[in-house]
Amino acid sequence: MEPMSDYFTSRRIVVTGGAGFLGQYIVRGLERRGCRQIHVPLIQEYDLVKLDDVIRMYETMRPDAVIHLAAVVGGIGANRAHPGEFFYKNLLMGVQLIEQARLHQVEKFVAIGTVCAYPKFTPVPFQEEHLWDGYPEETNAPYGLAKKMLLVQSQAYRQEYGFNSIFLLPVNLYGPGDNFDPASSHVIPALIKKCVDAVRTGVDHIDCWGTGAVSREFIYVADAAEAILLATERYDGSEPVNIGAGREMRIKDLAEMIAQLAGFRGEIRWDASKPDGQPRRCLDVSKAKAYFGFEAQTPFGDGLRKTIDWYRATLEPRQA
Ligand SMILES: NC(=O)c1ccc[n+]([C@@H]2O[C@H](COP(=O)([O-])OP(=O)(O)OC[C@H]3O[C@@H](n4cnc5c(N)ncnc54)[C@H](OP(=O)(O)O)[C@@H]3O)[C@@H](O)[C@H]2O)c1
């Protein structure tokens, strides 16, 4: 259990997207640190794409710091289906929230970017210095670039106004509470659902997108939340900082590992007509350690087991 933190006990914190997957872990982490004034603007009351709602949120909640997680997100399928919506909403939410934070004298703004902002062919492990060396992988470029503009805004505002906005780049998240909807899920929940459902229904094969030859890195959601809270408390720099576990894995190996943990013994078929996304992804995580003392703690197998157990306990029975 984390010690009480002077930073959080004495401040009003707004967590946009605080009811989402990552957001729930951030809120729990704030509570464990003794933060008594946590505000989550739900979309039903504050649609953060709308400027009037953003202004009303700042006037009502009067935060000292904002952790901005609200976003429209999804896997390759969702990114391909909604590039316009992902670009417009993510850009507008972030740009308005940062500008209004400055105008409302907010002390600190924590903008959450994404590994999707990196160029398609970044040398592995991805270092923050390479962020501007090329265009992102096409399927997630509108989403990744919309988020990357918040880095530009953060740096420009620090330079012109002395506004304290930081920018973090988490790699793919996974864990209990993830989105398992096949229309929008990321690769880990998609594979877990396929394997667990196949075991339950007795199906002898599963179909997966792409070749399986590309690689990804994953961070357990509770570890990512810890990183964001450490950065909120300790990091006040203008350089972007990667948040990851520093472990690269081929999608084929991931599928086999999930199949084994889920008890699925059938065939894994790959559909090469579907896109693979970025060829390789793995972050250099040394800056997070140097700047705010973060290192991911959860072993990958443990995190996957917890996620599979959560899916079985929470979602599977209702779908039977
Ligand atoms: N998941 C990943 O692998 C990953 C990786 C890197 C970075 N990130 C970043 O981490 C953050 C959290 O992601 P997540 O996976 O936790 O996503 P999530 O579960 O979809 O959470 C996003 C939250 O934002 C809210 N939201 C969306 N549009 C909104 C609007 N117009 N006004 C107010 N709230 C709005 C959503 O509310 P509703 O659900 O009610 O619409 C939801 O609660 C995002 O910024 C994402 O870009 C995620």
Image: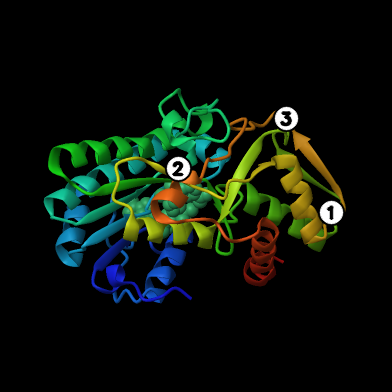
Closer mark to the observer between disc 2 and disc 3: 2
For label 3, the SS is loop
The amino acid type of the residue labelled 2 equals: Thr
Report, in whole angstroms, how far the alpha carbon at label 2 lies from the one at label 3.
26 Å
Q: Is residue 21 toward the left or the right of residue 248 in the image?
A: left
The picture places residue 75, in percent across and down from the top left corner, at 55, 43
Q: Which mark is residue 203?
A: 1
User: Does the beta carbon at disc 2 come under 8 Å from ligand 1?
Assistant: yes
Closer mark to the observer between disc 1 and disc 2: 2
| Residue at which label 2 appears | 114
Residues 1 and 153: in front is 1
**Residue sitting at x 46%, y 61%:** 226
For label 2, the SS is loop
Report, in whole angstroms, how far the alpha carbon at label 1 lies from the one at label 3.
21 Å
Report, in whole angstroms, how far the alpha carbon at label 1 lies from the one at label 2.
35 Å
**Residue sitting at x 18%, y 47%:** 163
Q: Report the residue that reaches farthest toward the top.
A: 134
The picture places residue 68, in percent across and down from the top left corner, at 33, 53
**Residue sitting at x 68%, y 63%:** 302
| Residue at which label 3 appears | 272
